[in-house]
Amino acid sequence: MRRLLPLFSFLFFLTLLLVWWVDSRQPKPVELIPTLTGQPEYCITCHADLPEISASHPVETFGCVSCHGGERLALDADLAHSTMRGGANPSDLSVAEISCGGSNCHSGSEADDRDHIQRVMTSVQATYAGAIASIRYTFGAQTDLAAHFGIAAVSDDESQTGIKSLDAFNPAIDSNPMLQKFGENCLVCHLHAKPQEGEAFARQTGCAACHSTGEHTMSTAIPYTQCNACHNRGNYDLRTMTFVERTDQPTSRLADYYQPISQFTKCEYTLDCVDCHTRDETMGDGDIHANQASIQYVQCKTCHGTLTELPLTKTLTDPNDIVFRMAFLNPIMDLKLGDTIIVTEQGEPLWNARQLPDGTFEMVGKATKQYFTFRPVMGTACEQNPDQQESNYCHECHAVEK
Amino acid sequence: MTNLSRRDFLKLVRDGFLVLSGALALGGVLRFLDFQPNPAQKTQFDLGSATNYPIGSRTALSEIPALLIHAESGFSALSLVCTHLGCNLGEDESGFACPCHSSHFDAEGKVTHGPAAKPLSPLRIEISEDNRVILHTS
């Protein structure tokens, strides 16, 4: 035994050396105590190089754990990340209420326009109700086009559309194999869907699908390319019930913009989607809608009016009007009390379209910051019947050649 | 040079490793004893002599952040942390503005524009025996 003592002493030394080495490799913790929580967290020990998520969410105030979860004092990456919410996407709708909610944040009341999460949860972008009903109807699983199912179950007793709830769609209850393929292949691309595997899809659900415009950045200045990540990624082949990725490589904005087979006026492809389409259309209005057509209502006439009507406008008189909050978050215009802006038929503000003293309008692109001016149709040579205002009528004269 | 027997050599090796192990262990103990926890957040600030703040002065202290007011009635202070979610406020021509969510407070700390609902929190001021202004944030 005594003969082995040198060996034991060597192994003991080696063990201590190993412990020392492992310990010396631990990063020196960098502490942050966010004002909001007052709880120390060590996340920026490794993540100090990440950009600020947005001007509204400074890390000194929010820290990381309020939104992401995680073990705030762990220095081991696996342990620190073990309890993160939503993986790389804390805004995934399965966890958004915990990550982004709270009455001071994004699940406040309808009255103060802070019910973002509730509206998104019940929106068509999240439920996909129209497509599910349409496909089930097409393949004989239901006798009408009424919405019965969403990607996830939702309910709203106060919904004004007559639809108070949707059940979670389970393709297994339908015997038609096409519906099962629909379930497998076509339900992965909506805000409430389970994200597809892979980093490329990590932020394509929940709030991040629209607002995560760069690495670790959230914005309301959403370029059309963000919308294109879902809306122009390809198309469905209904014969095989598969999604066919785009193969063309567009070199111009016109060719890149939305469905390649569609027609566009210059403003449709020069502006970004969010320059015309409103919060209610994209994030939902809080009610459960049967399909996209039920919530999407902005038309050319919203900004241009018709031969007999000027576009609807309102003059800003309330300093607490939501338009000032929107303009604050994306400061592309110096909106002031007394300014007159365009509003939709539902009263939603197009706050980046302001009337000029001569009756024409100016618009600033929310993402591009480009400046445009335009005039109402009334008083021009346009001969379009005021009752026929769908875009295809306008395209007859104003569409550009591709 | 003396010839080292095998027994003595092994003894030397054993003792050498034990000494090195002891040194490592001692280093670990010293490191443990020397550990300095992160200091608790400061809640008391010595703002210097009261004579530095004449009556009628309003001094923004961005590093705290707080506003020190010296009125006829004496010293008072307001927290310059937004009561909505805790962002640091910036001063403007009519009061204090939150750079995060556009809350606004007048010069007295009352809310003039939401989303903040509560006025700015008053902070306790103490004048020490040697006439120094001490500000307490909690």
Image (cartoon, coloured by chain):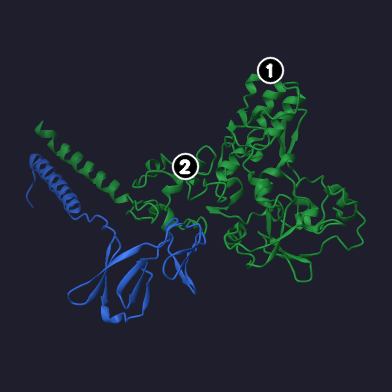
Chain colours: A green, B blue
Q: Work out whether A124 lies above or below A132.
A: below
Q: Are marks 1 and 2 on the same chain?
A: yes
Residue for point 36% across, 51% down: A41
Residue bearing the label numbered 1: A175
In this picture, is A177 found above or below A133? above
Chain of the residue where label 1 is placed in the rendered structure: A
- Examine the image and state in which quarter residue B37 appears: bottom left
- Relative to residue A234, is residue B41 drawn left or right? left
Dot 1 or dot 2, earlier in sequence: 2
Amino acid carrying label 1: it is Ser
Asked whether the beta carbons under mark 1 and mark 2 sit within 8 Å of each other, the answer is no
Q: In this orientation, does residue A130 appear?
A: yes
Q: Give the Cα separation between the discs numbered 1 and 2.
A: 37 Å
Q: Label 2: which residue?
A: A98
Label 1 Cα crowd, 10 Å radius (few <14 / some 14-19 / many 20+): few
The structure residue drawn at horizontal position 86% and vertical position 54%, both measured from the top left corner, is: A399
Q: Quadrant of residue A375?
A: bottom right
Query: What is the x, y in percent for residue A332?
Result: 63, 64
A149 horizontally vs B119: left or right: right
Q: Nearer the viewer, residue A50 or A59?
A: A59
Q: Please tell me how crowded label 2 is: few (under 14), some (14-19), or many (20+) other residues with Cα within 10 Å.
A: some
